[in-house]
Image: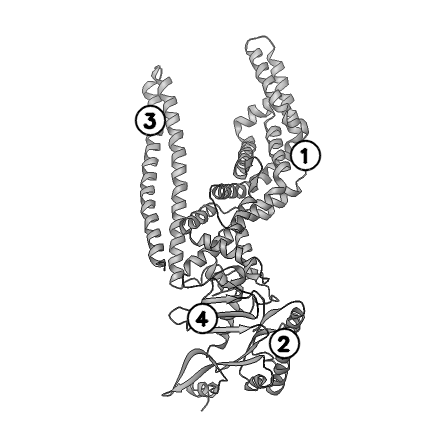
Amino acid sequence: MTDLKGFYTHQKDTFQKELQRVKKKLSILATLRLLVFVGFWFSIYLFWGAMALVVVLPLLVVLFLYLVTRFSNVKRHKKYLERLVAINTRELEILNRRYQDLPDGKQFLKPDHPYAQDLDIFGRGSFYQYANRTTLLQGKEVFSGLLLDGYPKDIAKKQEAIKELAKLPEWRQHFSALAGETQPKISPDLVSDWMKNHKPFMPKWAGIVPPIFTLLSIFAVALAFMGLVPESLVLFWYFLGIGVVGRYAKRIIAFTSKVSEAQETIQQHQRLISELEEHTFSSELLQELQKKLMVEGETTSKILKRFSQSMTMLEQQFNLIVSIFAQGLGLYSIYYAFRVESWIGKYGQEVEGWFATIAQFDAYITLGTYAFNHPDHTYPTLTEGNMVLIGKEVGHPLVDPKKNILNDFEIQKGRFCVVTGANMAGKSTFLRAIALQIVMANMGLPVKGREVKYNPVRLLTSMRSSDSLADETSYFYAELKRLKYIVEELEKDDCFVILDEILKGTNSVDKAEGSKKFVERLVKNGSTGMVATHDLSLCTLADELPEVENRYFDAQIVNGELFFDYKFKEGVCQNMNASFLLKNMGIVD
């Protein structure tokens, strides 16, 4: 079993040491750059009027530019190392169960979802907050989508992909650190929508005329320099060019603004695509994703790099020298606006797919990290037949391992389990553990348990209901709507149903009768599931229906103290604790 704390501590220490070396290198480069700058002006003073100046100055300029470039690259590497240190620091914090300040994904919660509200999928202390490692905005959306996708499909392929990524911890961190290099202001969705809907405005001649115009300009300037044509002709030619550019200037400037907004997003994904192109995957799902980044005859990263280069050149139209000379003598803006538009026309429809694929990788890297971080988990063996779920030492992955009491569990298709138990005995936590196992298994994740076998199934839950003043919905009516939804979904296909203390919004007699009839209907429909209750009358269903079985969590009072063993047992709970708790806490005599 992997020593997770040792691994992340080693990673953190390694990157911190390298970071210190890089900081020293930056300091040296900054000093050298300053010395060369001072040397440049000192050389002018020292060699003014001497031929040596012709040799020394170009050398100093070249050296200064090299140092500027080198400084920029080393600074970029420094930030990359800082992100790697942060990644490993965060992992160590999560290992110590300190993750409640991380993004909780509550913006993705859908109140009417089949199970998300009941299982703490999103929100403070949620599974999303605990497991999420995505870096990209779209990656977060994909990961939340995987958590919400209750339809089991391609589970074996997902497991294979997650297993492969779990074995690549260093590469996963490298990818995440690259993805975090920039935080683009414009989302990939907006960029791809703009590219798909952009209507070209540059004329077709814009790709041919500017180069010809530039050659003619050079020829005209050369002739004027030799005195073969009047300078007024060159001036006329220059203003002709300015006039042509001016005709499209307003639209080009607006277009450039859009391009500039998209540039960071494009560059970020170009680097990530380049990284994925260089990696070889063996699992089918990851290979399929990788193929979506392929373009016949050329790599996607090179295509995006070419676009980035054209965007950079287009932005140079605001450079003073370009504005003065290249516009009038070379139709600069027209040419590069045409180049960018041509690229959009050829590849703009593909960009959305490229962005989506990168987001899928970002999400699956999160799943791979979860699998790596939980070597005590098991990938469920997929089965067919009557058995729906069976596992040994099953537990909830968000419960502190030091306090997590594990239980064996199995249930067959068409069986319904009535779970009784005292307050705080562990009923709801266990039901959520079973439900989360199904959610995780459908995602392809390993689950908290051993020897787990799983026959894929949809999950439906009713464990929490809430009233709504805005919708004028009472608590009881909200619960009835939820139960009606479950019945309607069960008519479409088989589902695993988990209920916790249903019909809480009515009196005890009515609740007992209604709960019994509802469970009877589910059983007669051949449904599979579990219901937790304090109402022992519901346990009589096991005497009336062979499909129903009773299980319980016990509570005992030992030496005047309440004791829970949190073990899942066969039978009906006989020890309730509400009266004891009221007295023990001084609420009643």
1 and 3 marks in contact (CB < 8 Å):
no
Residue 301 shows up from this direction: yes
Q: Which residue lies at the image location 36% right of the left edge and 88% below the top edge?
A: 559
Question: Where residue 122 sits in the image (x, y, percent)?
Answer: 52, 63
Q: Which of the two labelled residues, at mark 1 and mark 3, occupies the earlier sequence position?
A: 3
Q: Which of the two labelled residues, at mark 1 and mark 4, occupies the earlier sequence position?
A: 1
Q: Which of the two labelled residues, at mark 2 and mark 4, occupies the earlier sequence position?
A: 4
Residue at mark 1? 201
Q: Which residue lies at the image location 58% right of the left edge and 14% below the top edge?
A: 219
Quadrant where the C terminus lies?
bottom left
2 and 4 marks in contact (CB < 8 Å):
no
**Tag on residue 392?**
4
Residue type, mark 2 in image: Leu
4 and 3 marks in contact (CB < 8 Å):
no
Question: Where residue 386 sits in the image (x, y, percent)?
Answer: 57, 70
Residue type, mark 3 in image: Gly
Residue at mark 2? 522
1 and 4 marks in contact (CB < 8 Å):
no
Q: Which of the two labelled residues, at mark 4 and mark 3, occupies the earlier sequence position?
A: 3
Residue at mark 3? 39
Residue type, mark 1 in image: Phe
In what element is the residue under mark 1? loop
What's the distance in space between the residues labelled 2 and 3, CA to CA?
87 Å
Question: Where residue 73 sits in the image (x, y, percent)?
Answer: 40, 37
Q: Which of the two labelled residues, at mark 2 and mark 1, occupies the earlier sequence position?
A: 1
Q: Quadrant of residue 307?
A: top right
Q: Is residue 1 left or right of residue 246?
A: left
How many C-alpha atoms fall within 10 Å of the one at disc 1: few (<14), some, or many (≥20)?
few
2 and 1 marks in contact (CB < 8 Å):
no
User: Which one is closest to the eye, mark 1 or mark 4?
Assistant: 4
